[in-house]
Image: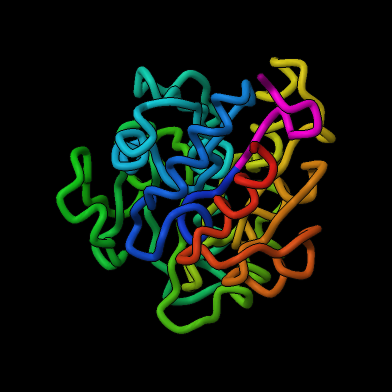
Amino acid sequence: MHNLRSPRLVATDLDGTALRTDGTVSPRTAAAFARVEEAGAMLVFVTGRPPRWMRPVADAVKHHGIAVCANGALIYDMHTERVVKSHLIDPDVLEEVVAQLRANVPDLSFSVEYEGGFAHESDFPVGSWDTRAHGRVQVYGDSLTARACVKLLAQHPEMGADELHSAVHELVGHLVTATHSSGRALIEMSAHGVTKATALATLAERHGIGPSDVVAFGDMPNDLPMLTWAGTSYAVANAHPGVLAAADHVTAANDDDGVAVVLEKLYK
């Protein structure tokens, strides 16, 4: 039976928060997630990950729950493994954003995320997750902005993440919503106004759930809108300083099952 004192919705970031540093879901955390759903509450994974990176998580939680992917641009059904809603950046906006950033921030390289794959410039560093990813395309010049995308990414080889984010926001913050989540100078841009919070709020409203009935967990700046919106927010101990300062509470680090520690108390 659902504990009336417990939140009706649990929203958690994945990498650096609910997942261990090696990217796995610990048995303790998987059990805590199951406890949430057994109590009748809604479990939402709110991540910067694209859908193609969700399979290991879906397998670990037995394909339960729903995910907000790409920092709010996509709603992804974990059971059917299908995108059910999307907010894309239009090609004309992409073109203007890339032009402004190239003109003002030397040495940037770019990639774009689509619902089913991604494209990147030849000098954009491709991570291990995407080395063999289906749908990866190397692009040149104007082809980067040829069609609508889920997310635009800009990487700088030397700048700090916060420094680059400030520059990008100043230059194109009126066109896209920029954030970062990796600790590197890798800026993630979504359609203007799209954040983890906007997608989560829409999803919660459809189920008659308000912010006061939501507990959220995060670790990086892309989690800040969600943590601010939720009635109760937790930062894991390994979080970015700005997140630690903004959250209502701090729990144990991701490698110490910080999310599970809280959920075990909330859903007894």
**Split into 4 quadrants, where in the image is the N terminus?**
top right
Number of numbered labels in the structure image: 0
> Where 243 falls versus 208 (above or below)?
below
Q: Position of residue 161 (x, y in %)?
A: 56, 74
Residue drawn at 22 percent across, 51 percent down: 138
Q: Is residue 34 magenta?
A: no
Where in the figure is residue 206, as x and y percent of width and height?
Answer: 70, 15
Q: Is residue 118 visible?
A: yes
Check the image and report above or below for 255 versus 3. Answer: below
Residue at left offset 62%, top offset 39%: 11
Give, as a single range, the part of the protein colored magenta: 1-11
SS majority, magenta: loop
* Relative depth, front residue between 51 and 119: 51
Magenta span has 8?
A: yes
For this orientation, the residue located farthest to the bottom is 158
Residue 55 lies, with reference to residue 144, above or below; the image says above
Q: Residue at x 39, y 59 (%)?
A: 110
Residue 176 in view in this figure: no
